Amino acid sequence: MSRGFCGEHHYNLDAKGRLSIPSEIRKVLAENYEEKVILTKDPVEGYLVAYPLEVWGEHEEKVKKLGSTAAAKKYIRIVFSAAVECELDKQGRILLPPSLRDYAGLSREAVVVGASTRIEIWDKERYMKNNVMSEGEMEELAKLGI
């Protein structure tokens, strides 16, 4: 079984909107996937999420099974309309399109989070505010066996 993405990494975007992907995350990408990701919006918490191409394909298959409820249609509209393929450059950076930077509130300081099968990209301030779990959330996870 392959190791997933993990770690919390603080970086600055450069003037062109490029973000360095941490070497630990690049290593997992290189060992397990193509060095390309699909970058899109998280529709709930306002950060960006990068999926390796293979994981994105699995996600697409799950989404096809959602049906045509209003929630499913809205999710597809938000996530799939924003999705762009990004390839890491020779310095291990990806270019974050202006529309996605605006959505996530990214201007300078970013946090790159390894989250198992995906990579989260947060505005530092937003990340610090959202990186706490409530007692109710912990109870919900306990019921799931975590």
Image (tube, helix red, strand yellow):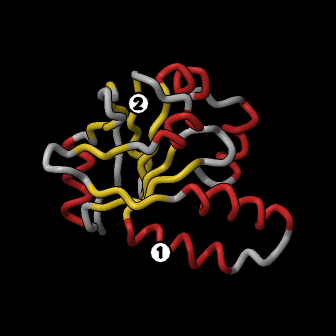
Kindly identify the residue that appears in the image at 65 percent across and 73 percent down: 63
Q: Which quarter of the picture shows residue 67?
A: bottom right
User: Mark 2 — residue?
Assistant: 111
User: Mark 1 — residue?
Assistant: 57
How far across and how far down the image is residue 10, in percent?
A: 34, 26
Left or right of 114: which side holds 3?
A: left
Kindly identify the residue that appears in the image at 61 percent across and 60 percent down: 81
- In the rendered view, tell whether residue 43 sits above or below residue 35: above
How far across and how far down the image is residue 141, in percent?
A: 65, 46
- In the rendered view, tell whether residue 1 sits above or below residue 18: below
How far across and how far down the image is residue 61, in percent?
A: 57, 79
Residue 6 in sight in this render:
yes
Along the line of sight, the residue nearer the viewer: 41 or 3: 41
Q: Residues within 10 Å of mark 2 (few under 14, many from 20)?
A: many
Along the line of sight, the residue nearer the viewer: 2 or 17: 17
Distance from the alpha carbon under mark 2 to that under mark 1: 25 Å
